[in-house]
């Protein structure tokens, strides 16, 4: 039988696929999940990470950082995900040995007595709008002695000595919440960074009543009124436990590129994955190519670790926006689609021997659970784990 993917092993990374226990009954209302229930019931529990309420990074970010060995030596891994340099590499830049932070244009909403960050994806910011705002902000940033790279107009990368120990929260970690505790601070002292506050204030004033924002507000869209700092770190030598990585996430793609493994866009379904594998390609792009035709090959000094026994990692993210917005009807629809498009055919492939091993990493906003299941596991009828046992309190 022709191998449908590297070594017949597949691992699905699913950000925001695991609701908190308090939300589970609403999120999974009327869901029919026989295939996932069967997989979970027979699977081996590899890892369960509970997480904490005020961690600044997200569990799927920490998971990919650990998998690829992207944490600096001696780092406390509990809340570390220094992924900005890999994001920069995925976007077409070269981080070199510098320390970089990712900075994104955002909207901060004024609530009754506090400020709330909204999900950056909900801005619907076009590249043209982002380019104009970037052109306004760039000289202000450079005047402060900060280096800026922006291969993508809506995602910038800053490097400056004054930001060396600054810790920022992932935008989706802070979205929908009072931003007070999530604002960047000095990692060792907990104090606010004057350098960052000055830069942020300069950009905010330059964008206030800018024609781009006036036009957006006239169309009923939120203004772009601030910038958000996160994921700071320096690139490390990494290695991949996966032979191929299919993801739209810049951090995951950048890690794979640095590690020297094939990179592509995530397929729409298990059937699309098997079809692409049968023809030797990756869904969405040619394997190892970035959108727009840029090469996704690793740098010359990368520690290439792709091997014939590695699994294919597929990162699927239909859940983030509805999870952050607490739109459980849309989250429910995404879960149902995943059941049909992925869980059911993957279970059938395991039963037939077409797939040797399936890994699942289900993440919430604080914790994650990783499971593996093989064809042999499906015969272990005494295993009775249920989906509810995975929920994070």
Image (tube, rainbow, N blue to C red):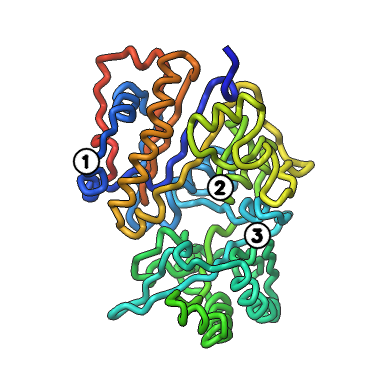
Name the secondary structure under disc 1. loop
> What whole-number distance in Å separates the C-alpha atoms at marks 3 and 1?
47 Å
Labelled disc at residue 30: 1
Tell me: residue 326, above or below residue 74: below
Q: Nearer the viewer, mark 3 or mark 1?
A: 1
- SS label for mark 2: loop
Q: Is residue 194 left or right of residue 261?
A: left
What residue is disc 2 on? 248
Of badges 2 and 1, the one in the foreground is: 1
Whichever of callouts 2 and 1 sits on the residue coming sooner in the sequence is: 1
Residue 110 placement, left or right of 146: left
- Structural distance between the alpha carbons of marks 2 and 3: 23 Å
> Which numbered tag is attached to residue 99?
3
Give SS at disc 3. Answer: strand
Q: CA distance from mark 2 to mark 1?
A: 30 Å
Label 3 neighbour load within 10 Å: few <14, some 14-19, many 20+: many
Discs 2/3, front: 2
Identify the residue at image location x=68%, y=47%. 290
Q: Residue at x 30, y 57 (%)?
A: 326
């Amino acid at each position: 039988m022709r191998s449908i993917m590297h070594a017949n092993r597949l691992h699905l990374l699913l950000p925001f696929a695991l609701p908190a226990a308090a939300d589970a009954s609403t999120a999974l209302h009327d869901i029919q999940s026989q295939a996932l229930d069967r997989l979970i019931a027979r699977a081996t529990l590899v890892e369960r990470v509970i997480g904490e309420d005020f961690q600044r990074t997200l569990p799927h970010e920490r998971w990919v950082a650990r998998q690829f060995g992207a944490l600096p030596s001696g780092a406390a891994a509990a809340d570390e995900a220094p992924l900005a340099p890999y994001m920069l590499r995925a976007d077409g830049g070269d981080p070199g040995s510098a320390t970089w932070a990712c900075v994104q244009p955002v909207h901060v909403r004024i609530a009754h007595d506090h400020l709330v960050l909204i999900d950056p994806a909900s801005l619907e910011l076009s590249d043209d709008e982002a380019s104009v705002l970037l052109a306004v902000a760039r000289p202000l940033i450079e005047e402060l002695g900060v280096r800026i790279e922006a291969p993508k107009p809506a995602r910038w990368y800053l490097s400056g000595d004054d930001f060396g120990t600054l810790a920022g929260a992932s935008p989706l970690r802070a979205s929908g919440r009072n931003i007070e505790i999530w604002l960047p601070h000095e990692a060792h002292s907990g104090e606010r960074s004057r350098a960052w506050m000055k830069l942020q204030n300069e950009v905010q004033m330059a964008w206030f009543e800018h024609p781009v924002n006036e036009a957006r507000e006239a169309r009923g869209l939120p203004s772009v009124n601030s910038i958000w700092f996160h994921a700071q770190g320096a690139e490390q030598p990494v290695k991949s436990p996966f032979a191929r990585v299919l993801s739209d996430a810049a951090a995951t793609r950048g890690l794979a590129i640095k590690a020297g493994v094939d990179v592509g866009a995530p397929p729409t379904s298990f059937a699309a994955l098997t079809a692409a594998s049968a023809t030797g390609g990756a869904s969405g792009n040619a394997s190892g190519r970035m959108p727009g035709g840029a090469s996704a090959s690793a740098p010359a000094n990368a520690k290439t670790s792709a091997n014939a026994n590695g699994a294919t990692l597929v990162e699927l993210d239909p859940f983030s926006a509805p999870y952050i917005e607490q739109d459980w009807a849309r989250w429910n629809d995404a879960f149902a689609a995943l059941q049909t498009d992925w869980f059911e055919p993957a279970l059938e492939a395991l039963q037939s021997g077409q797939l040797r091993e399936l890994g699942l990493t289900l993440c919430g906003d604080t914790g994650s659970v990783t499971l593996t299941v093989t064809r042999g596991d499906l015969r272990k009828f005494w295993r009775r784990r249920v989906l509810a046992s995975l929920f994070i309190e």
